[in-house]
Amino acid sequence: MSSSNGLTRFVVIGALTFACGTLYSTPAAAANYRSFYQNAGASCHGVDALSDAKLTRTEGRLINKTNSSIDVICNLMTDVYAPQSTNKGVVTFVALWARRYAGTGRTMSCTLTDGFYGQTGSTTYQPDVANPLSLPNSGAQAIFTWTPGNLATSRFLAPVNVRCTLAGYTELNDMFVEYEGDIGTAY
């Protein structure tokens, strides 16, 4: 029995070592796509102190427990060293999950702004889905997505920010950002 446990331990450690080595190895191509997944409780806040004070923040979500609408901003980071050749930008996809906290017939509207919020030259984009988006009465999540028109010639300039109007009793859950990174060069 002890030799069986030793063999199992050896196989598991070997597999983990191989997997970690594979994850950290540099591919032949200099550019690749990276992503991050973040919860809204950490990255989103009210547009001002009064709005922020009305929100409930948990480990995984940002909740509007009031009966009135509240405007929030989600600042979504990317790699500051990612290449932005010929102003194509680096962000290739953004997703934001939302759901109804209570009540029925709830909607939420969101827009994405590339560059720093309020920066001269930044552009605002509507989501790929209906805006405002109807949140299911079942409590299931709905998803906002943003994809640049033509990925070969267009990217969102980093960083990107999402501004949402949360109707009463709605919440933001998680977000996902995909961006192009240059991992072939040391920073």
Image (tube, rainbow, N blue to C red):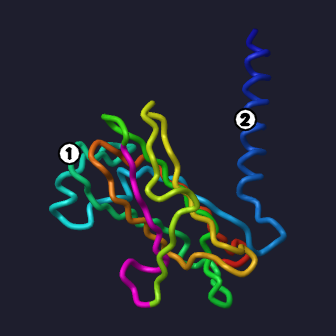
Q: Position of residue 8 (x, y in %)?
A: 76, 23
Residue at the limit of the structure toward the top, as seen here: 1
Q: Nearer the viewer, residue 12 or 119?
A: 119
Vertical order, 185 against 52 (above or below): below
Q: Nearer the viewer, residue 58 or 66?
A: 66
Q: Position of residue 119 (x, y in %)?
A: 39, 85
Vertical order, 148 against 54 (above or below): below
Q: Amino acid at mark 1?
A: Thr
Quarter where residue 85 is shown? bottom right
The mark found on residue 66 in the picture is 1
Q: Nearer the viewer, residue 8 or 141?
A: 141
Q: Position of residue 142 (x, y in %)?
A: 50, 45
- Label 1 near label 2: C-beta < 8 Å? no
Magenta stretch: includes residue 117: yes
User: Which residue shows up at 53% across the image and 53% down it?
Assistant: 37
Quarter where residue 103 is shown? top left
The mark found on residue 13 in the picture is 2
The mark found on residue 2 in the picture is none
* Label 1 packing within 10 angstroms: few (<14), some (14-19), many (20+): some
Cα distance between the residues tagged 2 and 1: 51 Å
Q: Amino acid at mark 2?
A: Ile
Quarter where residue 152 is shown? bottom right
**Foreground tag (2 vs 1):** 1
Q: Is residue 105 left or right of residue 71?
A: right
* Label 2 packing within 10 angstroms: few (<14), some (14-19), many (20+): few
Q: Nearer the viewer, residue 102 or 14?
A: 102
Q: Is residue 65 left or right of residue 23?
A: left
Q: Secondary structure at mark 2?
A: helix
User: Which residue shows up at 52% across the image and 49% down it?
Assistant: 143
Q: Earlier in the sequence, mark 2 or mark 1?
A: 2
Q: Which residues are magenta?
A: 106-120
Magenta stretch: includes residue 24: no
